[in-house]
Image: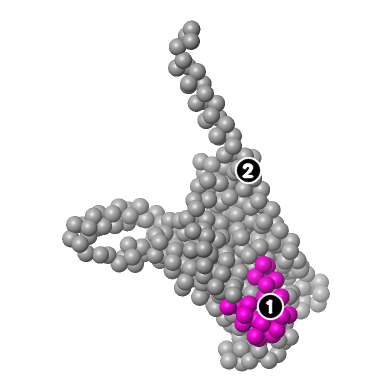
Amino acid sequence: MLLKTFGWSFAITAVGLAVAVLYGGWEALGIVAILSILEISLSFDNAVVNAGILKKMNAFWQKIFLTVGVLIAVFGMRLVFPVVIVAISAKMGPIQAVDLALNNKDRYQQLVTDAHPSIAAFGGMFLLMIFLDFIFEDRDIQWLRWIERPLAKLGKVDMLSVCIALVVLLITSFTFATHAHQHGGAHVDKAQTVLISGIAGLITYMVVGGLSGYFEDKLEEEEEREHEEEEEAARTGKKRSPVVLAGQAAFFMFLYLEVLDASFSFDGVIGAFAITNDIVLMALGLGIGAMYVRSLTVYLVRQGTLDDYVYLEHGAHYAIGALAVILMVTIQYQINEVITGLVGVVLIAWSFWSSVRRNKALAAAEGKAAGSDEKAEIPSGV
């Protein structure tokens, strides 16, 4: 089971490290290994959240997530995305941006750093909306009840999460503009960029998340129809394509997963520049890490971990909220990537420990109830 799920990750790790040695020797191998660990630590909460969505999809779309999805994640977000950002921000062609990334790495790093405010605002707003929609939803299982219970009541107010997200964005952009004004107004235009990028992140969430939610609501109806078609196919002996079985619901959930992964990868891509400005090593290291995160997502689904440890999803969403705040703060201040990674790890570890305690308490209660029933069945005088 472990080898089947992580086999591709092991293979890509071996190939990636070999390419790193050929490209830049043993020093390059060390950098790629560090970047891989950085990506895994920063994205563990991503795996937990993805697992909550992926478990609703069939085996075919889980394979698509591990194959086509990885190509999008590795080559799209870890290789193409930084080049596109540089091309847009520096107003140059993609070929020029690639040439800059390969031959003038310091200038390339500076351009990506300059684009950080817009990247952080977009990703921060997208992730903040995920957290707010989760925390305002009324759930049967609550982890931190003293927080979640009153917030669930507030969540009955329509569009509350959108209003809060917009207030956070306005405060962030206003603070950024004020700071720029105090320093001679050199960054006033960037405050406007933060506002526009944040609104773009909010719109992206509402469009992609809305479509995903719409089709997810229809998923049960589709499953019933597919079950009937499967029975008919069994009678006629005709095989049905897995793509047809997955339907529109799975496609839009897959699209949502890709946008979610993109938002999570922002901090990893930016953080990688603290280690290296070599785009090849960056793509190798972050790509290997992204592959492990995706394999871990599938592993959590197939093992039923989220069903066994019910607070894990809560911990992951709190980590998302923390990451959203950190991204917005990094528009103005630099925060060490170790802190970013540790916040997520601590929250998920805490939720896991809470889940274990809950399972032990339930098992003890069931054992006590079973003992009472047995005692009641023993005839008097025995």
Q: Can residue 167 be seen in this view?
A: no
Residue 44 vs residue 183, the one in the foreground: 44
Residue 321 vs residue 338, the one in the foreground: 338
Q: What element carries label 2?
A: helix
Q: How many marks?
A: 2
Residue wearing tag 2? 354
Choose the circle earlier in sequence order: 2 or 1.
1
Label 1: few (<14), some or many (≥20) within 10 Å? many
Q: Which colour scheme is used?
A: one colour
* Magenta span: chief secondary structure: helix
279 left or right of 240 in image? right
Range covered by the magenta-colored residues: 15-38
Q: Quadrant of residue 212?
A: bottom left
Residue 314 lies, with reference to residue 288, above or below; the image says above
Question: In the rendering, at what x and y percent does residue 117 appear?
Answer: 68, 73
Label 2: few (<14), some or many (≥20) within 10 Å? some
Q: What element carries label 1?
A: helix
**Residue reaching furthest to the left:** 236
Residue 192 vs residue 355, the one in the foreground: 355
Task: Give the numbered dot on residue 29.
Answer: 1
Question: In the rendering, at what x and y percent does residue 354 appear?
Answer: 63, 43
